[in-house]
Amino acid sequence: MFKRKAQYEVRTAGDPVLSRVAAPVGIITDEIKQLAEKMFQSMVAFDGIGLAAPQYGESLRLIVIDVPLSDEEKAAGLTPFEESMYNSMPMALVNPEITAVSGDVAERDEGCLSVPEIYAPVVRPARVAFRAQLLSGTPIEGECGGLLGRCLQHEIDHLDGFLFTDRLSPEAARRIDGQFKRLVEFGKSHDFRRVKRK
Ligand code: ZN
């Protein structure tokens, strides 16, 4: 008769779990699959395109992504690997790892569910080679650019204890400094959690 509202959570900047180097996932157990499912639900609840396990409070090398393909990137052309990635969205990636980065860089505004309402330009390699496992255990490996390549770098950064705010130019860092400090202060009195009930 009464349906309990589901509760979704994301940890916010200042939570120590976000600065830790996350542990590799060993065997892909049912618990890992359930964690990926809960992370996916939280990502959707907060309208994100990616979420790393530390943002969910679990210091494990697991990410979920649901990167939209823009008309612009579609028109610019995708490699077969990028196309297969977009066709597999949303996806969970276990132990994702950047294996090589391009020499050329790209700049784009980034945001983060753990850093709400703060956006700033981040310069990153334009393309990356990466490998990971799917929840089925199947290994995947390939190169990605565009928003997908950027999202992978952002999420894998979370697994190494970095936020996008650690990657800013001195000017951009100065610009968001006050807002970021207020966010961390606010987090201290809210257990570094954003909670949404639906
Ligand atoms: Zn993030």
Image: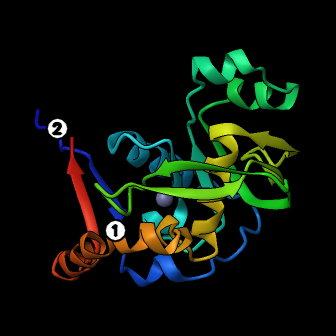
In front here: 190 or 123?
123
Number of the front mark, 2 or 1? 1
In front here: 75 or 59?
75
Secondary structure of residue under mark 1:
helix
Q: Residue at x 38, y 63 (%)?
A: 114
Q: How is the image coloured?
A: rainbow
Secondary structure of residue under mark 2:
loop
In front here: 24 or 74?
74
Q: Is residue 89 visible?
A: yes
Compared across the picture, whether 137 is left or right of 91 comes to right
If the image is split into quadrants, where does the C terminus sit?
top left
Q: Residues within 10 Å of mark 1 (few under 14, many from 20)?
A: few
Compared across the picture, whether 14 is left or right of 62 comes to left
What's the amino acid at mark 1?
Arg
Pointers 2 and 1 in contact (C-beta within 8 Å) = no
| Residue under label 1 | 175
| Horizontal and vertical percent position of residue 188 | 22, 83
Q: Residue at x 42, y 53 (%)?
A: 111
Marks 2 and 1, how far apart in space? 44 Å
| Horizontal and vertical percent position of residue 31 | 58, 59
| Residue under label 2 | 3
- Cβ(mark 1) to ligand 1 < 8 Å? no
Q: Is residue 12 visible?
A: no
Residue 116 location, quadrant? bottom left
Q: Residue at x 67, y 77 (%)?
A: 23
| Horizontal and vertical percent position of residue 132 | 80, 53
Task: Give the number of the disc on residue 113.
Answer: none
